[in-house]
Image: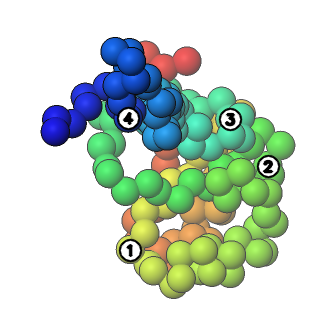
């Protein structure tokens, strides 16, 4: 006896073949959709790193290329401080950073300051972070081609 290649059982009844429907789910369309969604999220994920709007000053320095995502501190034009997108008071900054990083002093921390904020406020935040023992603290700025 031969096996049927049409996906269902076929039997001969009076010269006619009768096909039963496939009982298996066709996952090919679902895999196609998932691959498209994966590509969309891979492209858009780097664009959604920090949601606090800040007008950064421009610089001609080279762009950093690092595979590890850094922790970003933001000082907006009103002087409010954010860890990623969460607002925090300056007094609570160091304990919160130590809790987030699990006392890992080697984690990379970027400080973003609005170009209209006083230089002293940004340096005050950087001083707090450096005094807490974090070694890799850097300032962020816009590259000339960025908007």
User: Does the residue at mark 3 contact the one at mark 1 (Cβ under 8 Å)?
Assistant: no
Residue 40 shows in the view: no
State the mark number for residue 79. 2
In this view, the mark in front (4 or 2): 4
Residue that appears at 79% across and 49% down: 79
Q: Is residue 72 above or below residue 33?
A: below
Counting residues from the N terminus, which is met first, the one under dot 3 or under dot 2?
A: 3
Counting residues from the N terminus, which is met first, the one under dot 4 or under dot 2?
A: 4
Question: 12 or 20: nearer the eye?
Answer: 12
In which quarter of the view is residue 95 placed? bottom right
Residue under label 4: 9
Left or right of 27 on screen, residue 124: right
State the mark number for residue 54. 3
State the mark number for residue 106. 1
User: Does the residue at mark 2 contact the one at mark 1 (Cβ under 8 Å)?
Assistant: no
Counting residues from the N terminus, which is met first, the one under dot 3 or under dot 4?
A: 4
Counting residues from the N terminus, which is met first, the one under dot 2 or under dot 1?
A: 2
User: Which percent across, then down, holds residue 6?
Assistant: 31, 25
What residue occupies the far left of the structure in this picture? 1
User: Which percent across, then down, holds residue 93?
Assistant: 70, 71
In this view, the mark in front (3 or 2): 3
In this view, the mark in front (3 or 4): 4
Residue that appears at 48% across and 20% down: 146
Counting residues from the N terminus, which is met first, the one under dot 1 or under dot 4?
A: 4
User: Which percent across, then down, holds residue 44?
Assistant: 51, 31
Whole-angstrom CA distance, mark 3 to mark 4, is 66 Å
């Amino acid at each position: 006896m031969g096996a049927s290649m049409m996906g269902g059982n076929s039997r001969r009844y009076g010269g006619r073949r009768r096909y039963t429907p496939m009982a298996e789910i066709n996952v090919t369309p679902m895999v196609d959709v998932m691959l498209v969604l994966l590509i969309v999220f891979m492209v858009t994920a780097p664009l959604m790193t920090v949601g606090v709007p800040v007008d950064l000053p421009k610089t001609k320095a080279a762009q950093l290329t690092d595979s590890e995502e850094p922790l970003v501190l933001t000082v907006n034009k009103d002087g409010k401080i954010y860890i990623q997108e969460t607002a925090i008071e300056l007094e609570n900054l160091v304990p919160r950073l130590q809790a987030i990083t699990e006392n890992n002093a080697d984690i990379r921390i970027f400080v973003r300051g609005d170009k209209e904020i006083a230089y002293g406020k940004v340096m005050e935040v950087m001083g707090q972070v450096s005094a807490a023992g974090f070694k890799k603290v850097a300032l962020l700025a816009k590259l000339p081609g960025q908007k």
